[in-house]
Image: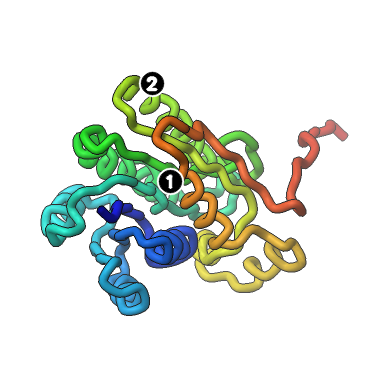
Amino acid sequence: MQPTALITGATSGFGAASARRFVREGWKVIGTGRRADRLTALGHELGDNFQGAVFDVTDEAAMKNALDALPSGFRDIDVLVNNAGLALGTAPAPQAALSDWRTMVDTNISGLLSITHHLLPQLIERRGLIINLSSVAAHWPYSGGNVYAATKAFLRQFSLGLRSDLHGKGVRITSIEPGLCESEFTLVRTSGNQAAYDALYGGAHALQPEDIANTVFWIASQPPHVNINSLEIMPVSQSWAGFQVHREG
């Protein structure tokens, strides 16, 4: 029987690349997202093994309705890939917009919690797998990261807490923590600033969404007795900067 993966945020970046990889390997995939046109296009590309589900993860009622309306062949979910998320703004905290902070918390934390809680009973029943897309920002703070980094630290800790709570139930849980990866993530963060995008990725040989998709699929392909607790991944070009030091002049 074909296993089924549900991938949130499948309209671009990691999510779309992961959907392609899983379908290529013979899986069925439910791809979720807000942009119906992109899910429709992905469905045309991937064929009958892909099913789109249009909703915003911050809308719990819409999420439940969309999942309840899935065709019968897509209702038994073995893997949940919590990929939907975003960063908004790069300003330090005093200049950051409170609305941006709230949107990041609502999407990266509250939306993820809603769909995870909703699917936990069947993931337990099927001895499934949850893969949460965190970030190196969960470990390594940087100026302007503030609430985005905090949401990713929450996600890493939530993954560990879930693993503890589901001890003995056969459910595997992984936190993937990518570093610099080229995707429209940065265009969203900078409100479409192409110059900022080009400056960030130019010459950096950043990770690509396909690299993350390969990692997600590798984790899902491990035997049932193997759990990858967390996995931090960076491009070779990226490492750690020094500590900031303010000096009185």
Q: Position of residue 9 (x, y in %)?
A: 37, 58
Q: Identify residue type, mark 2.
A: Ser
Left or right: where 156 falls relative to 224: right
Residue 137 position by quadrant: top right
Residue 180 position by quadrant: bottom right
The label shown at residue 197 is none
Of 248 and 30, the residue lying toward us: 30
Mark with earlier residue (1, 2) = 2
Mark 1, mark 2: which one is toward the viewer? Answer: 1
Residue highlighted by disc 1:
220
Left or right: where 145 falls relative to 103: right
Q: Identify residue type, mark 1.
A: Ala
Quarter of the figure that contains the C terminus: top right
Residue 160 position by quadrant: top left
Q: Position of residue 103 (x, y in %)?
A: 38, 50
Does residue 117 appear anywhere in the picture? Answer: no
